Image (tube, rainbow, N blue to C red):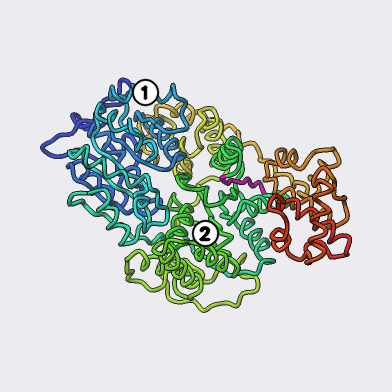
Amino acid sequence: MFRRGILMFATSEYRGFEAVKCELHSGPDLHSVLRQYWGYDSFRPKQEPIIRSILAGRDVAVILPTGGGKSLCYQLPAILLGGTTVVVSPLIALMHDQVAQLAQMGIPAAVLNSTLRSAEQSRTMTEATRGAFRLLYLSPERLVRSDTFGWFERLPISFFAIDEAHCISEWGHEFRPEYRMLHRLREQFPGRPIAAFTASATQRVRHDIIVQLQLRDPGKFILSFDRPNLRYLVREVEEDMQQPLLLHALKAHAGSNVIIYSPTIARVEETVDFLNEQGIAAVGYHGKMDGEARKRNQQLWVSDEAPVLVGTIAFGMGINKPNVRAVIHLSLPKSLEQYYQEAGRAGRDGQPGDCALLWQKKDAGLLAYFIDTIREQQERERSWQSYHTMRRFVDEPRCRHRQICLHFGETPRWTSCGMCDVCTDPPEWMKAGMSRRATAAVRVVKETPAAADPELFALLAEWRMEVARRNSVPAFVIFSDASLTDLCARKPRTREALLDVFGVGVKKAELYGGDVSALFKAFDEGRRATPKEEPERKAAPSVRTLELLHQGKSIQEIASIEGRQVATIVERVSVLIEKGMIDLHPAWVEPDRADEIRRVALAIGFERLKPIKDALPKDHTYDEIRLVVASLRYASGVPAGD
């Protein structure tokens, strides 16, 4: 099946794994390795020269956009070189996903981070010293522990791979102090190559990466920052237009995977409630959620059970899901680098994706306010530079793709992309209240084929979901959408034929060949996917809250039941009070404290809460004030919501 002397088959047992051997006089047959493990017939741009540089023992600095195939650039050399490749990544979710994917390919890998129990960490460390893993993933926090470098001395390390390398630079948008300690890798292991990878780095950040990691005459590889499959759509909106436009956008992408970025925790919860009321299966994700709830919601989204995920910027780093069809921002990001990275989570599979930015003027004011609170002058100046760059991006009617490329130091030959709201007609859902722009001559964008048979694709996707659940991994780890599409087109009936399918290597053909053959036979005999039930429209949040209050639940209990912050429930209760649907309850605010708040509010007015808070003793909370003010507004006849 493969050229003799080049490859040795990896058994399903990790302990029996042997590194792929290289013919030193001619170099390894990289395409055979690529086909055997990844099931790909060709490399993406820049991948092969990057891999050959690492195999030659050279440091490399690599800038590949999201979806450009960075992981393969260090995973494939890890197989060929033997020993253990240490991968430093700040992305816990990505580490686990990649280890799961490698397991599906028959490549032994492990994670070492804070999510593991102590016994599991000890077991992993012991096995690592025996050379059991080709790749070992660590967080930067774990790496800088005092005992880690001593332990490294006992590992058969082949090279170090630094993912998200822009985190090492203070000029980057996600600077992490722990990354500054990575210079110790060069000092303590001078003979081991270092490969640095990132998707978004300006020229200044790229220089900083090389200096901070002490890379020696590194091979520098930079792929274009242009993502031609992504359509950038920017619109300034009034507050009352944002939710209707969001709803239109989601209807345009019905059934597809979507990420919505919201500026605050309160807005995340408000948006999830709004979408659930409209019958859209959406889940939330933010840093203050209970860990289990956050994990459950992420799993529902990754497994395609809830197509829409609404999150703060805490969500997304390391999300490896390839079939996201839209990323929608509901506020202005802090920097163009941040926007590029977050929006770039759409279309990682090379298929079309929409990146919509629906921003409001107040977003800019809020960013400016926070920048002014930064005490350190240099950091404040950097933040202002980022702010002005972001404002130019949204304000100026210039090609969005070109603006991004120029920002990262790339000058495209084309002037009009054909894939943004400036260069071509925006989609129908975005046009409400807009005047139509004239379009310029545009770059040709490659059309991508749809699944050959929708019914067969649905059946394969249903089977993929069942297998993913049994293995507790994301569905795309089993087969990507691109693989399912190719399966529909080829309809392989044997394991050998399955090897010709895009993304199916030897190990996956072994694992799933029998299942896939049986599935095609069942399809021929009339089996179809189980029809999906439409998600129920949930009752309005205020209705649910009112029902729970009538059941005698406290505000804190309701917050726990609903999976919401207490402040969110307080806001709902306050609206109910303002509408006269319930009275202020002494269990929510002690009568003496309520009287004190009333006296101050009546003396200085209750249009705004902050002046009342400033005039009261410091132990009074905004939650208490909000509830009491709601009762005053109802008593004075002020309409709810004013």
* Distance (Cα) linking label 1 and label 2: 40 Å
Give the magenta range. 279-287
Q: Nearer the viewer, residue 591 or 218?
A: 591
Which residue was labeled with disc 1?
12
Give the x, y percent position of residue 147. 33, 30
Question: For this view, does 474 lie left or right of residue 88?
Answer: right
Which residue was labeled with disc 2?
354
Amino acid marked by disc 1: Ser
Residue 206 at least partly seen: yes
Magenta-drawn stretch contains 282: yes
Assign a secondary structure to mark 1.
Answer: loop
The image quarter containing residue 263 is bottom right
Residue sitting at x 70%, y 44%: 535
Tell me whether circle 1 and circle 2 mark residues in contact (CB < 8 Å): no
Q: Nearer the viewer, residue 103 or 273?
A: 273
| Pointer 1 local density, CA inside 10 Å: few below 14, some 14–19, many at least 20 | some
Give the x, y percent position of residue 440. 45, 77
The image quarter containing residue 550 is top right
